[in-house]
Amino acid sequence: PDARINLKKLSHVRYQHPNLQEIHQFLLDFGLQVAHQTDKQIWHRGYGPDHYVYYTQKGPRKFLGGAFEADSLGDFQRAAALPNAGPVRKLADAPGAGSMVTITDPDGFPFNVIYDQGPINSSREQPKQEKTVLSFPSEKPRVRQFNQFKPGPAAVYKLGHFGLSTQDFESQLQFYTSTFNIVPTDVVYIEQDGQRIPVTVFLHLDLGQEPVDHHAFFLGANPKTSHGHHCSFEVHDYDSQQLGHQWLVEKGCRPAWGVGRHVLGSQIFDYWWDISGNMVEHYADGDLVNAETPIGYVPAGPDSLAIWGPKVPAAFLE
């Protein structure tokens, strides 16, 4: 039998910020909405099928880890029984409630598993996201129809992925892939003494034949520092993304890298710095994989990151 703990889906990311009001305003401009708040905590949501996608608590800047949903009560109990797991906590104040356990990985990062959230309120307001009808040289379906867009934030649908820069790459990769149903999609490597040494791995949830995002999680080797690299949120399409980019520029936010198109996963990306100095991403039009997708092996270099877009800044690689 498979000894791995099965995770069903990526749920949300958790951060600590010194100024709740400032991060709240940034996240509104980034396209999130408030799901619930207390004096020292805020839960922000997208318009997708999650109670919330970004949890904030007041305190010195800190990455508190991503959170995945366990596939079953048995999987949750096995996660809680791991030697590096903390106590099970009831998420009494959180939308959807449920329980959470925080596991400390080999490099000291928190990794959260949740279970038993209640159903979403079906009357929750949804933004109307029309599919933009596109014209091509030999196919022009838009006759007497006009594409008209409104300025504003890029409405976030869901959390797509997050990742870690780690000084302990091999131990981290071994831990995550042997403990959970987290498997490699693409491996970026350098050549050393005739051998391929992995330096970045993009990983997806193994749900068998079910199509899943190209990556829900990634690990990057970093000889100098271990830190949360970025978290990434799906938006409706390219136009929403560009409108969101323009909105953030007008609000005086700090761009990190973008807009461009990735090679691995092929999503259109747009990275920003939040007010505490963490990197966050909007993405659109990404790839799906499943258990039959062969692992890709790609040599490291600027060509492995983007096929078009601005030159990658040094800060992104750190």
Image: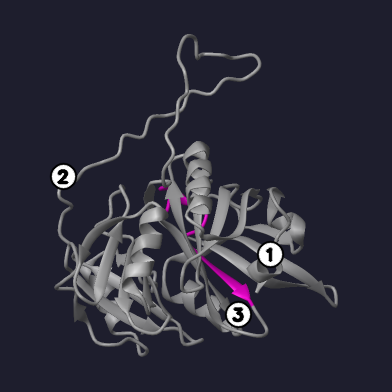
- Give whichever of 92, 254 is nearer the camera: 254
What percent of the width, then of the height, locates residue 220?
61, 72
Q: Tell me if residue 205 is in the magenta stretch.
A: no
The numbered disc on residue 150 is none
Q: Residues within 10 Å of mark 1 (few under 14, many from 20)?
A: many
Q: Residues within 10 Å of mark 3 (few under 14, many from 20)?
A: many
Element at label 1: strand
Q: Which residue is mark 1?
A: 188
CA separation in Å, label 2 and label 1: 42 Å
CA separation in Å, label 2 and label 3: 42 Å
Q: Specify the quadrant that holds the C terminus.
A: bottom right
> Which is more N-terminal, label 3 or label 1?
3
Q: Are marks 1 and 3 in contact (CB under 8 Å)?
A: no
- Give whichever of 163, 77 is nearer the camera: 163
Give the label, 2 or 1, closer to the camera. 2
What percent of the width, then of the height, locates residue 165?
58, 76
- Give whichever of 79, 111 is nearer the camera: 111
What percent of the width, then of the height, locates residue 310?
70, 52
Q: Which residue is mark 2?
A: 122
Residues rendered magenta in the picture: 208-221
> Which is more N-terminal, label 1 or label 2?
2
Kindly indicate the quadrant of the structure image that contains residue 200.
bottom right
The numbered disc on residue 169 is 3
Q: Residue at x 71, y 69 (%)?
A: 314
Q: Residue at x 75, y 59 (%)?
A: 302
What percent of the width, then of the height, locates residue 278?
50, 71
Kindly indicate the quadrant of the structure image that contains residue 296.
bottom right
- Give whichever of 103, 27 is nearer the camera: 27
Residue sitting at the far bottom = 83
Q: Amino acid at mark 2?
A: Ser
Q: Amino acid at mark 1?
A: Val
The reply to whether residue 68 is in sight is no
